[in-house]
Amino acid sequence: MPAHILVVDDEKNYLLLLDTLLGEQGYRVTSLQDPELARSYLGEADVDILIADMKMPHLSGQDLLEYVREQLPHIPVLIMTGYGSIDGAVEAMKCGAFDYINKPFSNDELLLSVAKAAQMSQAQQENRLLQQSLQEQHGLENVVARSRSMQRVLDLVSRIAPSGSNVLISGEAGTGKELIARSLHFTSERKSGPFIPVHCRSMDSATLERELFGLDKASATGETARERGRLETAHKGSLFLDEVAELSLDTQARLLRVLQEQSLERGEDSTAVEVDVRLLAATNRDLRSAVKEGVFREDLYYRLNVVNIEIPPLRERPEDIPVLAAHFLRRFNREYDGAVSGFSPEAMQALSAFHWPGNVRQLENVVERCVVLAQGGEVSLRDLPADLQDETEQFKSAADMLPTRLNLAETLERIEAALIRRALVQSDFVQVKAAEMLGISKSLLQYKLKKYNISGKTQ
């Protein structure tokens, strides 16, 4: 759609000239003589470019410019002046005008300036649409969870997202730590800024340091070439450090200095660059133990761990398995143009009973495989990987995951809680049916639900 241009000038002849000139180029033009009416119009209509005369009665072009900068900063403003006032034009540019045009103007110069403003307006509109899409995609409402433990996580995210505090997200690999980090960013006041992820384990120490802090290096001509780092790129946004425990002690010290001073230097002769970032860090290791072992700085740990979010593994929240599987099924049906209608009861029972050592990421991969390989309209038990079909193998794998040194009473309680969760899922959370499957009374089941803090529907 062609750009919509609002032209404001108290001289009618110029309005007619611009309406004809811009209209012939395919622009949509609205012309107004009254600048106060123009201000009201700007607040109600979708305008892409504003062209305003500098000198008008009651309300000047400068006044309109200031209004647009405050209320509609995405609209480029071109200021016209018939007085050849360089001072006025310079002042307008200082206040944020896209360009200024001297009257009488050259048609070609005016059209060139308008074309550049139209390109800028389109780029800003595309950026706004992209940001809106990202916010919708990564908002909290798109985090699929039914379990009480994950609802507590999402409640914590919604409460701390606006604060701007640094956050440490802990949990096993594959639990969705980056998803939570993105939700924190896109529900915060920094959502219009960049979200920059850095996967610390994927790079060696030297490469990681260059990626984070950038580099100033001399070129063949003797000039200094600047390579921006992720910290600088994340300015006014969020930096996500995945597997933060992999940072070397030297890199930790340098990162701490940047966080304290809110600026960084790429090299000894570099000028300090302002860095305003929110740090979101994730780890599947116990950082407190790493601090005691001397491999992670205690001061950086406290700087990162202003708020801690711990994501429970999938095996501790089987209530989420059916809704997650359905979510991934819809997604991969769209991606592969599939027509898989759902999961058979036997397949869903196997999914719900599995211990998922790879957590949500493993479930996602299994569902993708099912969409690709499923023969019929729904996923059957035979479409699942072999280790999900064999219940004996499941229990063997689960036993192999237990630590060699364990507290028997505590371990038995964890196993009992896991069996209760599985029974609830298989009975669609009907407690009477779950109790029958477990061979216990409903009252005993309810006692154990309270004991293990397990959510369940009262039926």
Image (cartoon, grey):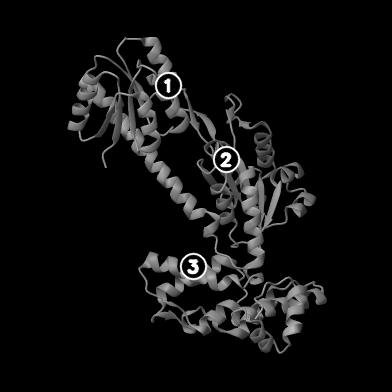
Labelled disc at residue 321: none
Q: Nearer the viewer, mark 3 or mark 1?
A: 1
Labelled disc at residue 327: 3
433 relative to 237 in the view: left or right: right
Q: Nearer the viewer, mark 3 or mark 2?
A: 3
Mark 3 → mark 2, Cα distance in angstroms: 35 Å
266 relative to 121 in the view: left or right: right
Kind of element beneath mark 1? helix
Kind of element beneath mark 2? helix
* First in sequence: mark 3 vs mark 2: 2
* First in sequence: mark 2 vs mark 1: 1
Residue drawn at the location 45% of the way across and 70% of the way down? 329
Q: Is residue 198 above or below residue 9?
A: below
User: Residue 119, how many percent across, how many down?
Assistant: 32, 34
In the rendered image, which quarter is residue 363 located in?
bottom right
Residue drawn at the location 59% of the way across and 24% of the way down? 269
Q: Which residue is mark 2?
A: 212
Instruction: Name the amino acid type tagged 1.
Output: Asp
Nearest to the observer: residue 241 or residue 56:
56
Instruction: Name the amino acid type tagged 3.
Output: His
Residue drawn at the location 53% of the way across and 54% of the way down? 139
Callout 3 touching callout 1 (CB < 8 Å):
no
In the rendered image, which quarter is residue 165 located in?
top right
In what quadrant of the picture does the N terminus appear? top left
Instruction: Name the amino acid type tagged 2.
Output: Leu
Q: Which residue is mark 1?
A: 63
Q: Residues within 10 Å of mark 1 (few under 14, many from 20)?
A: some
User: Residue 155, how many percent across, how many down?
Assistant: 64, 57
Mark 2 → mark 1, Cα distance in angstroms: 43 Å
